[in-house]
Image (cartoon, grey):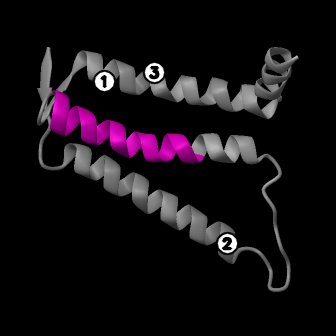
Amino acid sequence: EVFFSGSLGPSTIVGSAAFNLLIISAVCVMSIPPGEVRFIKSLGVFYLTSFFSVFAYLWLLIILQAWTPNVVTVEEASITFLFCPVLVVLAYLVDKGWHTKMLSRIVS
């Protein structure tokens, strides 16, 4: 089955995601009391989620402009849906230090 992207479909999703990203970031920064500093403890998870955030926009651009312009196929939707559990599992593994354990095994 083929679904056509209307004028509000992908644009609404991208606009909403960008708005949420900027507003959540702004609220987090503004909620820190003056004179205090916060640090990100797990940079690996931060880098992973940052990569996926940028990749999500690129992925939408690829599937809506390059592969099947203005059409969303079931395959594209399924792949897009599967990126969420992939992100969750990878973030969990990075948080638990799995990537460093694997690298130390490869190096030694």
Quarter of the C terminus within the rendering: top right
- The answer to whether 15 is drawn above or below residue 102 in the figure is below
Q: Dot 2: what SS?
A: helix
Identify which residue is drawn at 58% across, 71% down.
Answer: 26
Give the magenta-colored segment's residue range: 50-67
- Location of residue 77 in the rendering, given as x and y in whole percent from the top left corner: 30, 24
Residues packed near mark 1 inside 10 Å, few (<14), some (14 to 19) or many (20 plus): few
Q: Are dots 1 and 3 in contact, CB under 8 Å?
A: no
- Location of residue 25 in the rendering, given as x and y in whole percent from the top left corner: 59, 64
User: Looking at this view, is 7 or 100 the one in front?
Assistant: 100
Residue linked to disc 2:
29
Task: Give the label on residue 82, or none.
Answer: 3
User: Looking at this view, is 10 or 60 the one in front?
Assistant: 60
Quarter of the N terminus within the rendering: top left
Residue linked to disc 1:
77
Q: What residue type is labelled 1?
A: Ala
Q: Dot 3: what SS?
A: helix
Compared across the picture, whether 41 is left or right of 91 comes to right
- Location of residue 87 in the rendering, given as x and y in whole percent from the top left corner: 57, 30
Quarter of the image for residue 70 reads top left
Q: Which of marks 1 and 3 is nearer the N terminus?
A: 1
Give the Cα separation between the discs numbered 2 and 3.
31 Å
Identify which residue is drawn at 28% across, 22% down.
Answer: 76
Identify which residue is drawn at 79% across, 23% down.
Answer: 103
Q: What residue type is labelled 2?
A: Val
Give the Cα separation between the discs numbered 1 and 3.
9 Å
Q: What residue type is labelled 3?
A: Leu
Specify whether residue 66 is painted magenta: yes
- The answer to whether 6 is drawn above or below residue 29 in the figure is above
Quarter of the image for residue 80 reads top left
